Amino acid sequence: MIKRLLPYPLLFVGLLLMWVLLQQAAGPGQLLLGLAIAFGATHVMATLVPQRPRVRRLDRALVLIGHVLVDVLRSNLAVSSVILQGRRRQVTSGFLRLPLELQDRTGLALLACILTAVPGSAWLEHRAADNSVLIHVLDLKDEQEWITIVKQRYEALLLEIFQ
């Protein structure tokens, strides 16, 4: 009974707290509106029925985290360099369509987070028909280099972790 009324109680509480913090007010009207939004959002989440991820290789997940942290640091420095050099440096941004082997939903979501978190790149679209992703790269000097980075540093590890 309670599970049907509140399918994700922690999400409900988190959304309500987030609403109150964002509104910077805890008046009765704001609390009521926050309750309604949190209630509706948890029921929408219940209809999505997210699959439970199966992590098969936790040791590879730690390697992936290390790669991402190093790449975020490197990319921050590279993007800072592009910004500080301004017009003196020729920047060729572009779009890259990348075919993927990874099909696990959780793995794809993590890859999207990684590519968006690494400065200078952004995951724009996943095309399920051919299992490819469209990425925008701030300084796209060599497409093959980006393909190799994504396929070998991220996708290969995600395949080991989730499939």
Image (spheres, rainbow, N blue to C red):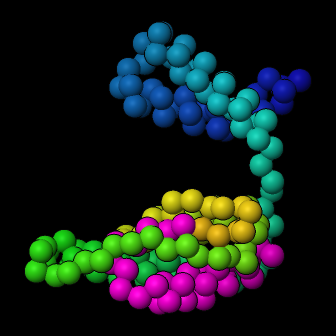
- Residue 33 shown in magenta: no
- Residue 159 shown in magenta: yes
Judge by depth and name the residue closer to the eye, 161 or 12. 161
**Residue extending farthest right:** 1
At x 76%, y 41%, the residue is: 48
The spot of residue 125 in percent (x, y) is: 57, 59
The spot of residue 55 in percent (x, y) is: 77, 71
Where, quadrant-wise, is the C terminus in this rendering? bottom right
At x 37%, y 80%, the residue is: 140
At x 45%, y 70%, the residue is: 95
Where, quadrant-wise, is the N terminus in this rendering? top right
Name which quarter of the figure residue 162 lies in.
bottom right
Judge by depth and name the residue closer to the eye, 154 or 6. 154
Name which quarter of the figure residue 160 lies in.
bottom right
In the displayed structure image, the side of residue 50 where residue 95 appears, left or right: left
Is residue 80 visible in the rendered structure shown here?
A: yes
- The magenta segment: 134-163
At x 66%, y 61%, the residue is: 127
**Residue extending farthest left:** 88
The spot of residue 45 in percent (x, y) is: 71, 37
The spot of residue 116 in percent (x, y) is: 47, 64
